[in-house]
Each structure stands twice: as C-alpha cells, then as structure tokens.
Amino acid sequence: MGKIVLNAIDIYKSYTNGANRLNVLDKFSLPVMEGEIITIMGQSGSGKSTALNILGTLDKPDSGVLEINGVNIDNLNDNDISSLRNKDLGFIFQFHHLLPELTALENVMVPTWIKGDYNYETKAIELFQTLGLIDRVHHLPSQLSGGERSRVATIRAIINKPCVLFADEPTGNLDKKNSLKLIDLLGQINRDFSQSIVLTTHDPDVASIGDKQYKLENGSLIL
Ligand SMILES: Nc1ncnc2c1ncn2[C@@H]1O[C@H](COP(=O)(O)OP(=O)(O)O)[C@@H](O)[C@H]1O
Ligand SMILES: [Mg+2]
C-alpha cells in the first residue's frame, strides 16, 4: 500500500454574485498517493482551477477537509500554511509568472531563498542539465521560447521536492510539439523522483498520462 500524500474529503465551494449562487465544487473528494499522476479533465468553467487552488491551499473551501501529509490544514495558522505550501507543494500554471528581471537560474532558486536556504545552486544546475536546459541557465525569461519558459517554471516547481506538484492546464498555451515535450518531462519527473502530480487539462492526449484519469462534472470527480 502506498502512502497518501494529499487527501481532500467532501469539499464544497460556491461563489455568490448578487442573488445568484454558483456551486462549483459539490462533495469533491480526491486522495493522492505518493508517486501517482492524477489527471482531471473538465470543460471550461467546470471548476478545475477552483479545485486546484483549494487542493494547493491557495484558496479556502466553504467546507470539507484537506489533509497534506496527514496534517489537517484546518489545524494550521496562515503562516504555517504558507510555509507548508512553499516547502511541500509545487505549482505550474498556464502563464508561468517567471520574474522578468531574474535569470532562469535565479527564478528557479526563488522558492529555496524563501525557505532561507542558499545551498541549492548545484542542485538547480543539475536539474537544468537533466531537463536539457543547461545552456539557458543565465537567460532572462524574455530570451527563452515558450516551451523553455514552461520547463524553467517546472524546475522552479520541483526544486523543493514538493510532495505534490499541481499543474493547471500547463499545456494550455503551448503548441502540440511543446505540449508533448512538457508532458514527457512531467512523466520523467514522476518516474525519477516518485513525484505525485495533479494536472488539469481539456486535452485527452495530455490526460492520458494519468495513472488515474478523472472527469470533473457537476462539482465532483468521476473516473
Ligand atoms: N472569484 C470568483 N467569483 C465568482 N465566480 C467565480 C470565481 N472564480 C471562478 N468563478 C466561476 O466558477 C466557475 C469555475 O471556474 P474555474 O474553477 O476557473 O473553472 P475552470 O478552471 O474549469 O475553467 C466558473 O463558472 C467561473 O466563472
Ligand atoms: Mg481554469
């Protein structure tokens, strides 16, 4: 039996606009095992980003339980949640938000500087090597292609060895070739580091890398 690294149980989330209430997540549950790739397909507006933001502690549910590494995050204060997020969770977004003034290497090191650890340069450079970006280490984001930027953002997301890596439509603004490259890369990271990954997409080819492939419909997941 593998270890559960993240467990979401009966999550509810709704948005209210004036008199209208929109139930986005409705008894949403998801266990994530160590080393498992979970993919979530859903139409635009089905709640994929809402779900990932809640699983990643970036947003709070109306009700429900979220446990990360066995810890119920309701028992943590905001500071503890921020440091858990920086240490244990990694994020790749469609628009990767690399800092424009920093080089690729510096961007990747930011999460380790936040931890107060200044000894990660060798490890970062190793990852650039592994991921085929060694000659791009000192480039600024503006000097990289879209595919390279997404790979740099991927290194940044895994530098702290998070227990779960979240990817919200990571291939959404990449062409087919770069999508496939990014998906290969995520598969490689999953194999090499037993990295659990939760990924949303509306592309069935991307979803097919999932060990478990869910659909988000009417606020909850179906296999
Ligand atoms: N902050 C918000 N306030 C009100 N409605 C929101 C907010 N965020 C998202 N929504 C609505 O919730 C639904 C789900 O959004 P989202 O999670 O972004 O879906 P997806 O990522 O699957 O496209 C959509 O109908 C969206 O308009
Ligand atoms: Mg979305």
Image: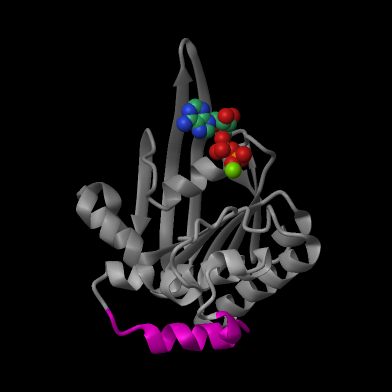
Foreground residue among 154 and 2: 154
| Camera-side residue of 4 and 194 | 194
Q: How is the image coloured?
A: one colour
Q: Specify whether 47 is left or right of 6.
A: right
Left or right: where 178 falls relative to 59: right
- Residue shown at 71%/72% (left/top)? 181
The prevailing secondary structure element of the residues shown in magenta is helix
Query: Vertically, is 79 above or below 48?
Result: below
Give the magenta range.
Answer: 118-136
Tell me: residue 146, above or below residue 155.
above
Q: Position of residue 30 (x, y in %)?
A: 50, 52
Q: Where's residue 146, x and y in %? A: 66, 63
> Where residue 202 appears, x then y in whole percent?
71, 49
Residue at x 46%, y 12% (from the top left corner): 18
Question: Looking at the rendering, which quadrant does residue 122 occupy?
Answer: bottom left
Which residue is painted at 45% across and 20% down in the image?
A: 16
User: Is 121 drawn above or below residue 115 in the view shown?
Assistant: below
The quadrant holding residue 133 is bottom right
Find ligand 2 in the image and state its quadrant.
Answer: top right
